[in-house]
Image (spheres, grey):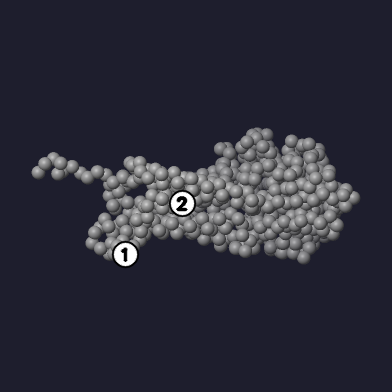
Amino acid sequence: MTDEDHTPPPLPRSDAMTAALHWGLVAVVLVSLGSGLRIAADAPDAALPQALSGVLPQGEVVVWHLWSSVAVTFIAVAYVAYVVHAGLGGRLALDAARLRAIAGGDRTGRWQAIGVMGHWFAFALVAGMAATGGLLYVEVAALPHEALAGLHRMLAWGFVAHAVIHVAIQAVLGPRQLAKMFAPRLAYGSAAGVALLTSGGAIAMVFVLDEAAMTTLPVTRVEAGLAPVIDGYFDDAAWTGAEAVTLRTVRGRNLPGGEVPVTVRAVHDGQTAYFSFEWPDPTRSQKHLPLIKGEMGWFLAGSDDHERRDENDFHEDMLAVMLARSPRPGGGAAHLGPTPAGAPGSPNQRGLHFTTDGSVVDVWQWRSVRTNPMGRMDDTYFGPPADPAGTKGAEAAYVTGHGTDPEAGGGYEDNHIALGDGRVRPLYLPRTPFLLARLGRFDLDPGASDAGEWWLAKADTVPYGEPLDARYPIGTVLPSVVVEGPFQGDRGDVRALGRWHDGRWRLEASRRLKTGSEFDLPIATGIHLWVAAFDHSQTRHSQHLHPLRLAVEE
């Protein structure tokens, strides 16, 4: 027997293109899975993703998830084109011989056949994830978002299970099988070139179709004398000729299925832009953290979730409008995770709004209790993360890029100071208890509709004092909001008034096309607009990926 008889056969080697696509898919799937779990962890009932929060990525994970999906598409198209042009279809053939091998006596053949079946299972999972992810991305109104997202997550977990089984099968086949992907050979070069060109063309088509799908919001020009009156009624002639665009917003708390459609119209008179917003809401929610007098003193209705910025029972209905130059999800200012800025994060650990390129995103916040009485939306912005030493109030403990435009007076304030042990003390009391009649009937059910006015004008109050406090019996309910008057300065640039009637909120708003403020964006062609509805929730608003692109008529 010669030494050559003991020479082991050469290790099997895959081809370079297959190996590159294989490892590329591994990397992309890890990004997609990590970013997807971070997105899922934002839901209050997502126990497993939240348990993994410490190891999940943080930041603009929605953008990463979308890009990883594009990369999966690139790899899938490239692999199909490569297999076809290289004539390698036999690798994936699930023919009678392979099916017989599963029950045959050859161990290697059996596991190889099982591996091929696993490949087809993976192809089906990828196709399912692509289909459900694509439907979530284009936001098809006819399909329930929560059910579609749930199916998408199930398919993702199925792919994770497949990956574990796939690695186990390769291990069963031995180290020679595992070595195939670590030392590939150069082969099928022309087929690889065709595959790359084909997949590149497919990705280019994806971007072309995505750009073409961008919805435009026409901002129609009207004569100055025909501009709408900001009164919360949609009876102005200007609205008749304005095109209505309805946005499907999803993932909101307290909303049916998490969804609510918001219809937007816009006109301008050459100096000022006017917007109308309309959305269904079966209840007029006004109980914004009301104070209740008990035997031990005053306390806030609800739980302590408001301290974590996550109150979802005793809060007001709201609408936010965001303007950004970038069409990226969240205008490039949405960062998920407990510490996405690399510094103390939000108390609710869900994420922060800030920009990373020095830009400013213009944000208008309409609050039905705190700003509606003054006829304004709160003009705020998202910018670079600020030093917490320079912040105040509720945001003083963490880094954020969310700030208010400069103000010169007016506004509102919270009518309580914390005493500890769950107790609070009002900062102001009504001059007379009779003023509380404006609250109407108080219903402790957070889902009940409120008919009264749940705020106090500062002119109708006096600073807290125990003698006056003694006039209020146990069980007294006191508003937690004191309104001084309209914001003065930049913060008061956006005039607005909303009215609730027959299960719908109707809101009108106006602002100059150009304010000259460094914290505002112009209302001009090419600016992108998002909306977010809050149904008596502090921060868990509805959302949508695709903005409206403004087209301002000259």
x, y percent for residue 392: 69, 38
Q: Quadrant of residue 93?
A: bottom left
x, y percent for residue 18: 39, 47
Q: Quadrant of residue 284?
A: bottom right
Inter-mark Cα distance, 2 to 1: 26 Å
Residue sticking out furthest to the left: 1
What is the crowding at mark 2: few (fewer than 14 residues within 10 Å), some, or many (at least 20)? some
What's under tag 2, amino acid-wise? Ala
Q: Measuring 79% from the left and 39% from the top, which residue is drawn there?
A: 515
Placement of the N terminus among the 4 image quadrants: top left
> What secondary structure is found at the residue carrying circle 1?
helix
Q: Nearer the viewer, residue 552 or 300?
A: 552
Q: Measuring 56% from the left and 55% from the top, which residue is drawn there?
A: 134
Is 24 situated left or right of 257 in this image?
left
Residue at image mark 1:
96
What's under tag 1, amino acid-wise? Ala
User: Can residue 213 be spotted in the picture?
Assistant: yes
Is 506 situated left or right of 50 in this image?
right
Q: Which mark is residue 248?
A: none
Q: Measuring 33% from the left and 42% from the top, which residue is drawn there?
A: 185
Residue at image mark 2:
76
The earlier-in-sequence mark between 2 and 1 is: 2
User: Can residue 468 be spotted in the picture?
Assistant: no
Q: Measuring 24% from the left and 43% from the top, which residue is drawn there?
A: 10
> What secondary structure is found at the residue carrying circle 2?
helix
